[in-house]
């Protein structure tokens, strides 16, 4: 079956493609559908944003769409940046600016208070009349925020997210290693299970 991944984030697309390799799912991207409009992520939760994107892309493309909304939730910041993770540092935000802002905000937080979690909510939707039942799943992984960026890999907040069971940040892991333990991997495992039961 065809599955359109509703993201323009190449890092996310690459991870999802890798995790669906070997399945009978043909992964398509928004680049395969010229003119597909950007969806404004104005929901208050990851679930609201993921569903909004999946519905819009399914209607535009006429195919089943998978959208995710994910981000970092830091204990000491009352769950921030949360749904604002990608635009945390304001207009012109990018990974480096977001990471630097987070480090500044966390500079006085002691080691014992630096807990955080990556959250990923994935939504599956089909175009009207397709019979595809809307579903959402959630993947969460716990870690803590380091005091500096570590590792050349990954994207987003990966250089700051220390995963204790592996003794390294997500950016210090290889792609395959990260794809076995990440929040996105945990959510996608649940999505793959849905396909097997359909």
Image (cartoon, rainbow, N blue to C red):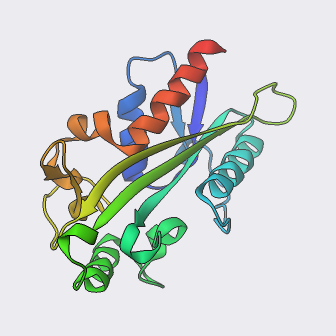
The structure residue drawn at horizontal position 14% and vertical position 58%, both measured from the top left corner, is 152
Please state which of residues 158 and 4 is positioned toward the viewer in this rendering: 158
Asked if residue 36 shows in the view, the reply is: no
The part of the image, by quadrant, that contains residue 48 is bottom right
Please state which of residues 87 and 130 is positioned toward the viewer in this rendering: 87
Please state which of residues 128 and 52 is positioned toward the viewer in this rendering: 52
The structure residue drawn at horizontal position 42% and vertical position 43%, both measured from the top left corner, is 184
Asked if residue 147 shows in the view, the reply is: yes
Measured as percent of width and height from the top left, residue 24 is found at: 50, 15
Measured as percent of width and height from the top left, residue 8 is found at: 50, 55
Q: Name above or below for residue 157 compared with residue 53.
A: below
Quadrant where the N terminus sits is top right
Viewed as shown, does residue 1 lie left or right of 16?
right
Measured as percent of width and height from the top left, residue 156 is found at: 33, 62
Q: In the image as oriented, which residue stretches furthest toward the front?
A: 112
Measured as percent of width and height from the top left, residue 34 is found at: 62, 50
Please state which of residues 147 and 75 is positioned toward the viewer in this rendering: 75
Q: Name above or below for residue 195 compared with residue 123.
A: above
Q: Name above or below for residue 186 compared with residue 110.
A: above
The part of the image, by quadrant, that contains residue 63 is top right
Quadrant where the C terminus sits is top right
Viewed as shown, does residue 101 lie left or right of 111?
right
């Amino acid at each position: 079956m065809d599955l359109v991944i509703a993201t323009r984030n190449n890092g996310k697309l690459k991870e999802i493609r890798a995790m669906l390799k070997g399945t009978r799912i043909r992964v398509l991207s928004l680049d395969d559908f010229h003119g597909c409009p950007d969806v404004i992520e104005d929901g208050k939760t990851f679930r609201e944003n993921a569903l909004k994107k999946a519905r819009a892309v399914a209607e535009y493309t006429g195919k089943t769409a998978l959208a995710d909304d994910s981000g970092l939730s830091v204990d000491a910041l009352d769950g921030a940046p949360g749904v604002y993770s990608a635009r945390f540092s304001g207009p012109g935000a990018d990974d480096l600016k977001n990471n630097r802002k987070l480090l500044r905000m966390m500079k006085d937080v002691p080691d014992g208070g630096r807990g955080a979690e990556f959250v990923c909510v994935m939504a599956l939707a089909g175009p009207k009349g397709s019979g595809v039942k809307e579903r959402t799943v959630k993947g969460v992984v716990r870690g803590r925020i380091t005091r500096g960026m570590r590792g050349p890999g990954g994207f987003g907040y990966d250089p700051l997210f220390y995963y204790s069971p592996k003794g390294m940040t997500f950016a210090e892991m290889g792609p395959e290693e990260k794809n076995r333990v990440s929040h996105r991997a945990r959510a996608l495992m649940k999505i793959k299970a849905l396909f097997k039961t359909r």
